Amino acid sequence: SAFAAYGNVPDELAAGNFQKGMESFNAATQHAKVSGNADFEWMCRGYRWMAARLAEPDSGSATAEFDRAVSELRRLDSEDSKFFADQLESVFVCFSRNDTRN
């Protein structure tokens, strides 16, 4: 399932293992896409691009893709998608404040 592919990715991001996080969320995104779960797919995409933003804070493309994922979740307008959009924004702020590379 997509949840199995999700694994310990939050731990990877918290530890600053952004590349591993991106790889894991790419796999989770594909699982969610195949299962037809758009809310979970866009949440995984958001986390994938969050990892890219954390790895390269000046990356305009990572920021744009992260913002797109949040926007798509808001557009889907389900209870889950709204929760995921809020979660992505909150978690990014938390990780940005606690940048483990410093």
Image (spheres, grey):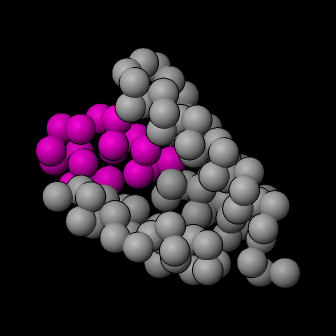
Left or right, 80 with reference to 36: right
Q: Does the magenta stretch include residue 84?
A: no
In depth, the one of 13 and 30 nearer the eye is 13
Whole-percent x, y for residue 37 in the image: 23, 38
Describe residue 72's horizontal placement relative to residue 53 as left or right: left
Hey, which quadrant is residue 76 in on the image? Answer: top left
Within the image, what quadrant is residue 16 found in?
bottom right
The answer to whether 85 is drawn above or below residue 49 in the figure is above
What are the residue bounds of the magenta stretch?
A: 29-46
Q: Can residue 9 be seen in this view?
A: yes
Residue 23 showing in the rendered view: no
**x and y percentages locating residue 94 in the rendered image:** 72, 56
Vertical side of 12 occupied by 91: above or below: above
Dominant SS of magenta comes to: helix
**Quadrant position of the C terminus in the picture:** bottom right
**Quadrant of the snapshot with the N terminus:** bottom left
Q: Residue at (23%, 45%) from the top-left corner?
A: 33
Location of residue 89 in the rendering, given as x and y in whole percent from the top left corner: 64, 42
